[in-house]
Amino acid sequence: MNQTASASDVPDEIADTEALNRRIHPDFVRPDGSVSSQAFTDVELSVDRAAYWEVAQTLRGYDGYGVASLIALVARGLHQEVVADKKPLNPAHALVKGKKTKSIARALARSAAWVAGFGGGIPT
Amino acid sequence: MLIYEGLPTPDVTGRHPSAIAAFDLVTGIRAFTDSQAWPAYLPPVVRNRMGSAIATAISNDDDLIVIAVEEDGLKAQCEISQRVKEAMQATEVFAPNEPVEVVGKIVELDKRSLSFKLETPSRTLTIEVSEWQFRKVDSDLRWERVYVAGFPRDSKCRTIHNVTDLRPAAVEEEDGFNLTDELRRGEKTETYQQVQTRANELLALDDGWNTYGARSPGKRAVFFALHFLRDAIGVLLDHGITVPPPFLVPTASGGVQLEWSIDSRELELEIPEKGRFEFLLVDGSKEVEGEASRWIAMRLLRWVVTGEDV
């Protein structure tokens, strides 16, 4: 991870093995700690590439949120396009593009792993 | 003897809708015969139609209609006697001393009689008001949706008088008469109350609440979901089925979703807006998704709770 990654440090191609971090609002978290499929329904799902953007950066300014991680290969296996979408202030920004049927959104949610929980812990 | 056999319905999975309705009818009539109380899933509007349909077939005290239904070896039967027929035909009776609440739209004002017409889904009522109440209607509530509490002037409640409350109707208040006690039972359950508490929390979310541009949950969608849940709990209670609490989650598009996970069965029932259901059913490794009517949504809920084929 590189907290000061610049756009030139971040490759345009996203490897199948890359982890993609998504900020999760606490209202998406079920009582058993799993994430609802509703957290993964955006046609252009905004994510941060974990290899180039620290979890702390994803959470900066968003106290009380968690971060769940998807693997690019899993998203691609669900007919999603995973593409870089570099922003001036976040060169590690990427999109998981494609229509999310309810079944696809559920599959993404079930594949997601917590990398940061709420208030520092990881939900169980 | 009249024998009816349901034709195949290729677009409908699971049990034949006619079979479900027939079993509900037979078990509902049997429930009345046993307890002298009608279950909520046979409301007056349904009973009255059935009562009218069989009126000519039962004219003597010893006449009897036997309805037997069978589906895949499962059988049920009920008997409609003269007494049961009369009970089916009985229209809803309003007692003059029991208050009623109704929500509808003001469609006509009559200054001379100090009254107005209130349009509800089932009929148009006359509301008699005091002079100051009429002034309020004339100045502030003309053609609006309003809530009225008062007393029936007649047993059919064609007119309401002695109005005790008159105000604009809230979004969450449904058009029509106040609910029957049977349906209100759903509101008293822990499941409903838990979801209602959660719904109130979700209604406090602002646009952009998920940090990715989500819309705040719409009141109409949230209250539609709550009303559906309340009614479903009440109806399923009549069948001895207790609905466990679902997880209520907001959607990014301004709706809400009810989620149940029981054994290997999962149901996601999304309400993107008032009056619409989208579902995902997961049964082990099998997944089905699509749009659902309110009736199908009720059957899906029954399926996820009991595992019964729908």
Image (cartoon, coloured by chain):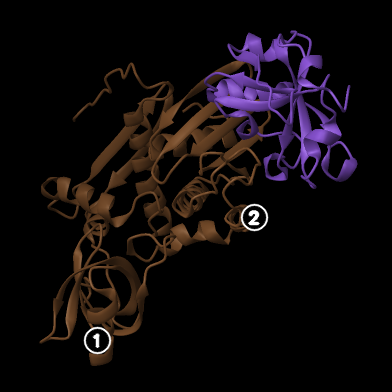
Chain colours: A purple, B brown
Q: Residue B23 lies in what quarter of the image?
A: top left
Residue B55 position in % (x across, y down): 14, 50
Q: How far apart are the two marked residues, 1 and 2, measured between alpha carbons?
A: 41 Å
Name the residue at 36% across, 76% down.
B167
The image quadrant where one finds the N terminus of chain A is top right
> Which residue is disc 1 drawn over?
B135
Do callouts 1 and 2 point to residues on the same chain?
Answer: yes
Image position of B265 with respect to B218: above or below: above
Kindly identify the amino acid type of the residue bearing the numbered disc 2. Gln
B121 to the left or right of A87: left
The crowd level at tag 2 (other Cα within 10 Å; few <14, some 14-19, many 20+) is some
Q: Which of B114 and B307 is in front in this view?
A: B114
B220 to the left or right of B97: right
Q: Nearer the viewer, residue A112 or A23?
A: A23
Q: Nearer the viewer, residue B190 or B73?
A: B190
Name the residue at 81% across, 15% down.
A9
Q: What element carries label 1?
A: helix
Name the residue at 51% across, 37% down.
B270
The crowd level at tag 1 (other Cα within 10 Å; few <14, some 14-19, many 20+) is some
Residue B53 position in % (x across, y down): 16, 45
Q: Is mark 2 on a helix, strand or loop?
A: helix
Question: Where residue B194 is drawn, which disc sits there?
Answer: 2
Q: Which chain carries label 2?
A: B
Kindly identify the amino acid type of the residue bearing the numbered disc 1. Arg
Image position of B25 with respect to B123: above or below: above
The image quadrant where one finds the C terminus of chain A is top right
